[in-house]
């Protein structure tokens, strides 16, 4: 089978590392000082998935992995806000964003055979939102955002972040 070369693995990790610099657009536009990055968000989401003893029958390890990869395409395309969300600056539909993100994830995963297929499959499962794990991780996603909003409101005296 195909193996991942060290240089390909490093290339993948460099792309993933950009998630540390991609700010969460919604917070930036809400005027948050020092808005969190996508990596910050995914890290705590993974911890939430770890912490919440998943309901009966949920695959906890799968949930943690899914949380770690669900926004990975934003390393390439950025955190685009879709039409119909709070403000329409990016002028992009949910379908267009998903298509761009899928292409980005596919390109990133092509560099790392084996584990790349697993990452892509987890990303697709999250996007489809049909399995108990995907629905659980989507709930973790929303909960992490609510928790972050409450922290910004508390720490920066901000109100009505919604």
Image (tube, rainbow, N blue to C red):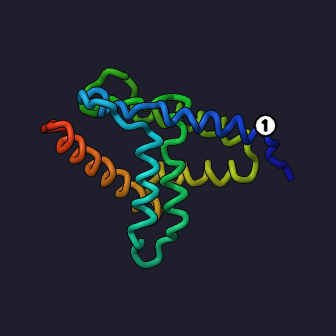
Q: Is residue 147 above or below residue 59?
A: above
Q: Residue at x 72, y 38 (%)?
A: 10
Q: Is residue 75 above or below residue 113?
A: above
Q: Is residue 54 left or right of residue 17?
A: left
Q: Nearer the viewer, residue 17 or 155?
A: 155
Label 1: state its secondary structure: helix
Give the x, y percent position of residue 150.
21, 47
Give the x, y percent position of residue 158.
16, 36
Q: Residue at x 31, y 28 (%)?
A: 28
Q: Is residue 39 above or below residue 57?
A: above
Whether residue 96 is visible here, answered yes or no, is: no
> Residue at label 1?
7
Q: How many marks?
A: 1
Q: Nearer the viewer, residue 7 or 123?
A: 7
- Which residue appears farthest toward the right when viewing the image? 1
Q: Residue at x 41, y 29 (%)?
A: 80
Q: Is residue 52 left or right of residue 4?
A: left
Quadrant holding the C terminus: top left
Give the x, y percent position of residue 27.
30, 33
Give the x, y percent position of residue 156.
19, 36
Quadrant of the rendered structure where residue 23 is? top left
Q: Is residue 153 above or below residue 118?
A: above
Q: Residue at x 49, y 62 (%)?
A: 63
Neighbourhood count class around disc 1 (C-alpha, 10 Å): few under 14, some 14–19, many 20 upward = few
Q: Nearer the viewer, residue 5 or 59?
A: 5
Whether residue 97 is visible here, answered yes or no, is: yes
- Which residue appears farthest toward the front when viewing the image? 155
């Amino acid at each position: 089978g195909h193996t991942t070369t060290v240089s390909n693995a490093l290339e993948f990790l460099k792309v993933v590392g950009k998630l540390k610099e991609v700010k969460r657009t919604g917070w930036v536009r809400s005027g948050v000082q020092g808005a969190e990055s996508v990596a910050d968000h995914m890290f705590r989401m993974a911890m939430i998935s770890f912490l919440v003893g998943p309901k009966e029958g949920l695959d906890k390890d799968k949930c943690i992995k899914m949380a770690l990869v669900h926004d990975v395409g934003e390393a390439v395309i950025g955190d685009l806000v879709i039409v119909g969300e709070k403000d329409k600056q990016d002028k992009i539909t949910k379908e267009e964003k998903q298509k761009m993100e899928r292409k980005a994830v596919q390109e990133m995963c092509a560099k790392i055979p084996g584990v790349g297929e697993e990452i892509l499959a987890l990303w697709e499962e999250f996007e489809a939102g049909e399995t108990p794990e995907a629905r659980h991780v989507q709930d973790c996603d929303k909960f992490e955002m609510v928790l972050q909003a409450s922290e910004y409101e508390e720490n920066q005296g901000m109100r009505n972040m919604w």
